[in-house]
Amino acid sequence: MKIKICGVKNIDDIKAVNAARPDFVGFVFAKSPRQVTAREARLLGANIYPGILKVGVFVYEPTEFIEGLYNDNIIDIAQVYGGQEPVVPTIRASHYDLEADYYLLDSPNPGSGKPGDWSKQKQLNKPVFLAGGINLSNLDEALAKRPYAVDVSSGAETDRKKDPEKIKELVRRVREYE
């Protein structure tokens, strides 16, 4: 099983993920308190430990913008909320009838820290990321669903900042579950 730590936005966050070594790190390009610019993502991404894949999170961004970030090696995978059909590796968080490499089941209100409807996982024909309110107290419940990966953002924070100890513990528990 794999884990993505989403919403990293500064060098301290990068140090925390490098120490814990999750499989994926998420840069939020959508309007959010965790939003980063392409320039910030490039600088942060240059400091990520090799092997940790960089995911760009987009809500109705133009396909050309997404592909530009991919072609510039700022992201390795696009996580899209919307009907975009980028020609890059894609995690689709909605519009499950469109092509994707992975699907993500998130809260109806992404970024809210509220769980999504994880029961839909069995209806999807691609590897699934579970998201929406995952934290140390409900991680086992998410892992018991046997997703491809779990996606954690606010659950890896204390006082709205990434917490290195929580990140380390989340990654450790996912690795142990395997």
Image (cartoon, rainbow, N blue to C red):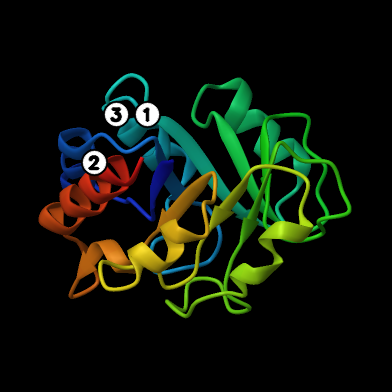
Which of the 4 image quadrants contains residue 137? bottom left
Q: What residue is rendered at 24% in x and 72% in y?
A: 160
- Circle 3 — which element? loop
Along the horizontal axis of the image, is 100 left or right of 77?
right
Q: How crowded is mark 1: few (under 14 residues within 10 Å), some or many (20 or more)?
A: some
Q: Nearer the viewer, residue 166 or 37?
A: 166
* Label total for image: 3
Query: Considering only vertical position in the picture, is 57 above or below 94?
Result: above
Q: What residue is rendered at 67% in x and 31% in y?
A: 89
Q: Position of residue 66 (x, y in %)?
A: 66, 39
User: How far apart are the two marked residues, 1 and 3, measured between alpha carbons?
Assistant: 7 Å
Q: Where is residue 37 in the image (x, y as percent from the top left)?
A: 46, 47
Q: Residues within 10 Å of mark 2 (few under 14, many from 20)?
A: many
The residue carrying mark 3 is 48
Q: Where is residue 161 in the image (x, y as percent from the top left)?
A: 21, 65
Along the horizontal axis of the image, is 131 left or right of 10?
right
Q: Which amino acid does label 1 sit on?
A: Ile
> Can residue 148 be seen by looking at this rendering?
yes
Q: Find out whether the residues at labels 1 and 3 contact each other: C-beta distance under 8 Å.
A: yes
Q: Nearer the viewer, mark 1 or mark 3?
A: 1
Q: Nearer the viewer, residue 169 or 80?
A: 169
The residue carrying mark 2 is 17
Q: Nearer the viewer, residue 132 or 30?
A: 132
User: How far apart are the two marked residues, 2 and 1, measured between alpha carbons?
Assistant: 9 Å
Q: Which of marks 2 and 3 is nearer the N terminus?
A: 2
- Circle 1 — which element? loop
Q: Find out whether the residues at labels 2 and 1 contact each other: C-beta distance under 8 Å.
A: yes
The residue carrying mark 1 is 52
Q: Which of 40 and 86 is in front in this view?
A: 86
Q: Which amino acid does label 2 sit on?
A: Val
- Quarter containing the N terminus: top left
Along the horizontal axis of the image, is 7 left or right of 78?
left
